[in-house]
């Protein structure tokens, strides 16, 4: 198997009926996923993730634009000839076939020799830790085991491109964590290009080389997990990934690598990323874990909510009519602040990310 890049050029999908509403399910999507990369389409329900994936797979016609695998345009190639396989949320195993036959099915259709099938299936059974389950019927297995079979069935085809549509959402939280690692490990080991759909941001963060954040059929931002979290380009991305505090302001002055900002909280200095102009309206994005609670009396803020979460203590703190989410990690042994306590908030410059308003 040889991994291939997946390229989308100006891809649009208009479903019949959606034309009247002037909203396309997918609008003018441009995307390059390098061979061997793990890319995740992330976004809220209805933003066009599944539709995009189904166009890559060939289950859905492309209204305008092109989909390429490597150098070849695949728009008119049927799904079974595209050299990609898809793993579904529902597993979609054949209920009347045991594990071995489920996994062998696609190779038999391809008319591969018995010896060859056996060799490939045995390898996948081992990789997926399924050797003890060969004879089992899907109904006799847990959700996690069935999902491993579904994954094995896709892997045995040795596709250049592996597509996943929320494959873990039927599993419990613990198993989801295990399967994340498993999928990522196998994808790396085999060097397959993977396109993964989820609306679970921690899943996207933990698995991906590249995250593609979608909103209303369009791409909002493409970047590494760090980029997306630390340098969101829009308010939507900042809000969708993690928790964000927003403060509106404008640019007072620009130095080489710093911005001087006027905000309702007073003058604030931030590190400059990107181009800004004097007077420009901006939004300051601050993550809850980057704001510091201090005891000095510079700006008096009041704790309005305090929740112990085990690994963290989460506060809501009011300062000048602004309510801030602030998270303290490792609250072990700390008494913590109580509702009504007066504290002070500090906004270190590296805690502030500035985006155009
Ligand atoms: N067959 C269809 N006919 C008409 N509209 C459709 C069809 N399939 C999807 N849509 C619409 O296209 C948009 C995108 O749907 P899509 O299934 O791609 O979203 P999604 O991001 O996968 O959402 P979810 O997270 O809920 O699975 C939605 O507005 C949906 O209603
Ligand atoms: Mg979907």
Image (cartoon, helix red, strand yellow):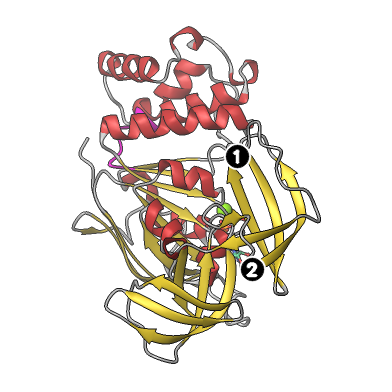
Q: Secondary structure at mark 1?
A: loop
Which mark's residue is nearer the viewer, 2 or 1?
2
Give me the C-alpha separation between circle 2 and circle 1: 44 Å
Tell me: residue 154, above or below residue 215: above
Callout 2: few (<14), some (14-19), or many (20+) C-alpha neighbours within 10 Å? some
Q: Provide the residue designation for mark 2.
A: 299
Which label is found at residue 169? 1
Is 149 within the magenta?
no
Magenta segment range? 153-161
- The image shows residue 273 at horizontal and vertical percentages of 34, 71
Residue drawn where x is 26% and y is 19% of the image: 113
- Horizontal placement of 227 versus 176: left or right? left
- The image shows residue 250 at horizontal and vertical percentages of 49, 85
Looking at the image, the residue that sits furthest to the bottom is 279
Mark 2 or 1 closer to N-term? 1
Residue drawn where x is 42% and y is 28% of the image: 182
- The image shows residue 188 at horizontal and vertical percentages of 30, 34
Q: Is residue 150 visible?
A: yes
Q: Respond yes or no on whether mark 2 lies under 8 Å from ligand 1.
A: no
Which label is found at residue 199? none
- Horizontal placement of 244 versus 67: left or right? right
Is 155 within the magenta?
yes
Foreground residue, 36 or 342?
A: 342
Q: Are marks 2 and 1 in contact (CB under 8 Å)?
A: no
Residue drawn where x is 46% and y is 19% of the image: 101
Question: Looking at the rendering, in which quadrant would you find the N terminus?
Answer: top left
The quarter of the picture where residue 313 lies is top right
Q: Secondary structure at mark 2?
A: loop
Q: Is residue 215 visible?
A: no
Quarter of the rendered structure image containing ligand 1: bottom right
- The image shows residue 130 at horizontal and vertical percentages of 45, 14
């Amino acid at each position: 198997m040889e991994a291939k890049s997946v390229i989308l050029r100006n891809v649009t999908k208009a479903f019949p009926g959606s034309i009247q509403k002037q909203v396309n399910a997918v609008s003018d999507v441009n995307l390059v996923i390098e061979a061997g990369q793990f890319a995740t389409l992330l976004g809220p329900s209805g933003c066009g993730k599944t539709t995009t994936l189904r166009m890559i797979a060939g289950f859905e016609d492309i209204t305008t634009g092109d989909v390429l695998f490597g150098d070849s345009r695949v728009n008119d190639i049927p799904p079974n000839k595209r050299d990609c396989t898809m793993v579904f949320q529902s597993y979609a195993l054949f209920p009347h076939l045991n594990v071995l036959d489920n996994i062998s099915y696609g190779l038999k259709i391809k008319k591969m020799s018995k010896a060859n099938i056996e060799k490939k299936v045995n390898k996948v059974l081992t990789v997926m830790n399924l050797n003890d389950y060969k004879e089992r019927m899907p109904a006799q297995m847990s959700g996690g085991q069935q999902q491993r079979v579904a994954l094995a069935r896709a892997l045995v085809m040795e596709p250049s491109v592996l597509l996943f549509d929320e494959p873990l959402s039927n599993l419990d939280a613990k198993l989801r964590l295990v399967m994340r690692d498993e999928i990522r490990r196998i994808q790396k080991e085999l060097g397959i290009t993977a396109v993964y759909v989820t609306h679970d941001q921690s899943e996207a963060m933990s698995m991906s080389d590249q995250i593609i954040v979608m909103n209303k059929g369009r791409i909002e931002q493409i970047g590494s997990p760090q980029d997306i979290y630390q340098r969101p380009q829009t308010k939507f991305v900042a809000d969708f990934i993690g928790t964000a505090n927003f403060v509106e302001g404008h640019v007072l002055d620009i130095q080489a690598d710093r911005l001087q900002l006027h905000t309702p909280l007073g003058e604030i200095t931030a590190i400059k990323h990107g181009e800004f102009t004097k007077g420009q309206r901006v939004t300051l994005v601050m993550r809850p874990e980057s704001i510091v609670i201090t005891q000095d009396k510079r700006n008096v803020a009041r704790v309005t909510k305090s929740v112990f979460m085990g690994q963290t203590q989460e506060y809501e703190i009011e300062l000048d009519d602004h309510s801030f989410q602030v998270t303290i990690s490792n609250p072990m042994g700390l008494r913590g602040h109580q509702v009504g306590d007066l504290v002070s908030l500090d906004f270190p410059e590296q805690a502030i990310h500035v985006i155009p308003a």
